[in-house]
Image (cartoon, grey):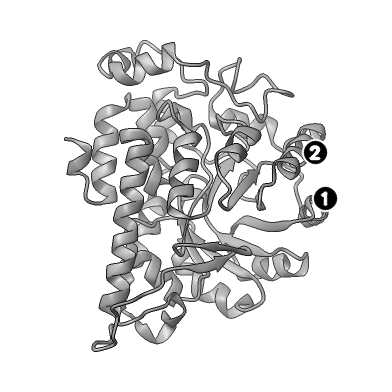
């Protein structure tokens, strides 16, 4: 299978699986416990149907919208994800350049494998930093100050990782950051020579936004679960979230909100946006999908705060359904991570081209010329 054979996100997943050692692929693809929530995140979109209008004069359409105070060419964001150089040697560099080319938002994680400053230098487009709050308050302050100096447009505080979910595929494979070779996985690494040679002979793997303060993840191999469970601040509460918003002073997002009550609290502390998200099904298995929760949250805080529906997006029509349900935009991680793993920047650009085409085609077939015309009257529950 070649990159030119990829015509949807599932095709990129198949190519990534063929090219990655299985512990690395399972880290991207896996989720918590029985992976019910991960599956539901995408399946939820099939529970509603689009109702198109015809003869609407759709020669010229406008897919752009305002998200977090910046113009975006598409109502789609590339969610922040960790350790991207484990998937392809270009890592966050590839995603930043692709996002810049397509004029869309992207984010980097605290656990990124490119530095805040390096990523900022790659693009003038809209960019977001995902903050994991550590027990080391000096590290938290340092990351916020670096983002301020580098001109990041928004800070997203991740609120759903007080402890790590039980990611059983990672437990079986022994995946760590940095990746390490184990007897059980050695054959898989040996039979993926392109990935293995890139990992061994290109620049050393590290987490440059953290390694000024901690060795874990850069020079000391740990699992993501172990990192979350030992390094992150389990005492996080609403008062700390409000203090971080105040310290940051710019556009502020809460990532991981799933209830209407929490959405109201986000409004109360002055957040500019929430990302309805269950961390790609990687935390609390058996929880609702973001798309399932979207109408309830829109009813509670719609019009008071921007609402980004994060997770499960595999098609342009999923984006249209999220917008018609009241979201400001949709976002996702695996939708570009499979493509990154498959072919680096070229893969991410092909994935974005496909999703852009699907959004544009879907809008024309729906009889809409602007994303603001996607309203609830264009959806029906099954």
Dot 1 and dot 2 residues touching (CB under 8 Å) = yes
Camera-side residue: 87 or 151? 151
Q: Is residue 295 above or below residue 188?
A: below
Tell whether 25 sits left or right of 78: left
* Mark 1–mark 2 distance (CA, rounded to whole Å): 9 Å
Residue sitting at x 65%, y 34%: 117
Mark 1: give few (<14), some (14-19) or many (20+) Cα within 10 Å: few
* Location of residue 47 by image quarter: bottom left
Query: Mark 2 = which residue?
Result: 141
Tell whether 171 sits left or right of 14: right
The C terminus is located in which quarter?
bottom left
Q: Residue 347: x percent and y percent? A: 32, 40
Residue sitting at x 46%, y 20%: 179
* Location of residue 183 by image quarter: top left
- Asked whether residue 34 is in view, the answer is no
The N terminus is located in which quarter?
top left
Q: Which mark is residue 205?
A: none
- Asked whether residue 280 is in view, the answer is yes
Q: Residue 140: x percent and y percent? A: 76, 38
Query: Mark 1 = which residue?
Result: 247
Residue sitting at x 62%, y 45%: 130
Q: Is residue 292 above or below residue 310?
A: below
Q: How many marks?
A: 2
Q: Is residue 209 above or below residue 124?
A: above
Residue sitting at x 56%, y 18%: 221
Q: Residue 119: x percent and y percent? A: 58, 37
Q: Is residue 267 above or below residue 209?
A: below
């Amino acid at each position: 299978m070649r990159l030119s054979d990829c015509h949807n996100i599932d095709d990129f997943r198949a190519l990534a699986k063929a090219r990655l050692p299985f512990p690395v692929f399972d880290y991207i693809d896996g989720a918590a416990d029985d992976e019910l929530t991960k599956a539901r995140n995408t399946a939820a979109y099939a529970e509603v149907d689009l109702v198109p209008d015809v003869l609407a004069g759709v020669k010229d359409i406008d897919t752009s919208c305002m998200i977090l105070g910046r113009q975006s060419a598409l109502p789609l964001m590339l969610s922040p994800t960790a350790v991207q150089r484990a998937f392809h040697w270009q890592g966050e560099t590839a995603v930043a350049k692709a996002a810049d080319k397509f004029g869309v938002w992207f984010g980097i994680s605290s656990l990124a494998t490119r530095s805040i400053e390096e990523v900022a230098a790659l693009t003038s487009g809209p960019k977001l930093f995902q903050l994991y709050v550590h027990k080391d308050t000096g590290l938290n302050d340092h990351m916020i100050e670096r983002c301020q100096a580098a001109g990041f447009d928004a800070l997203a505080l991740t609120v759903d990782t007080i402890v790590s979910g039980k990611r059983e595929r990672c437990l079986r494979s022994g995946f760590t950051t940095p990746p390490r070779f184990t007897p059980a996985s050695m054959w898989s690494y040996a039979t993926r020579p392109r990935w293995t040679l890139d990992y061994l002979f290109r620049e050393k793997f590290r987490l440059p936004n953290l390694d000024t303060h901690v060795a874990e993840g850069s020079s000391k191999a740990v699992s993501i679960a172990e990192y979350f469970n030992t390094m992150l601040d389990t005492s996080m509460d609403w008062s700390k979230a409000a203090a971080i918003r105040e310290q940051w002073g710019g556009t502020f997002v809460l990532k991981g909100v799933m209830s209407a009550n929490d959405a109201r609290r986000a409004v109360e502390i002055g957040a500019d946006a929430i990302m309805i998200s269950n961390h790609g099904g990687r935390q609390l298995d058996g929880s609702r999908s973001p798309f399932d929760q979207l109408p309830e949250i829109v009813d509670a805080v719609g019009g008071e705060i921007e609402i980004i529906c994060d997770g499960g997006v595999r098609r342009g029509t999923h984006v249209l359904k999220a917008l018609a349900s009241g979201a400001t935009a949709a976002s996702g991680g695996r939708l570009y991570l499979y493509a990154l793993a498959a072919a680096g920047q070229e893969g991410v650009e092909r994935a974005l081209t496909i999703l852009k085409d699907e959004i544009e085609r879907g809008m024309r077939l729906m009889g809409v010329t602007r994303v603001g015309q996607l309203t609830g009257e264009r959806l029906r529950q099954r």
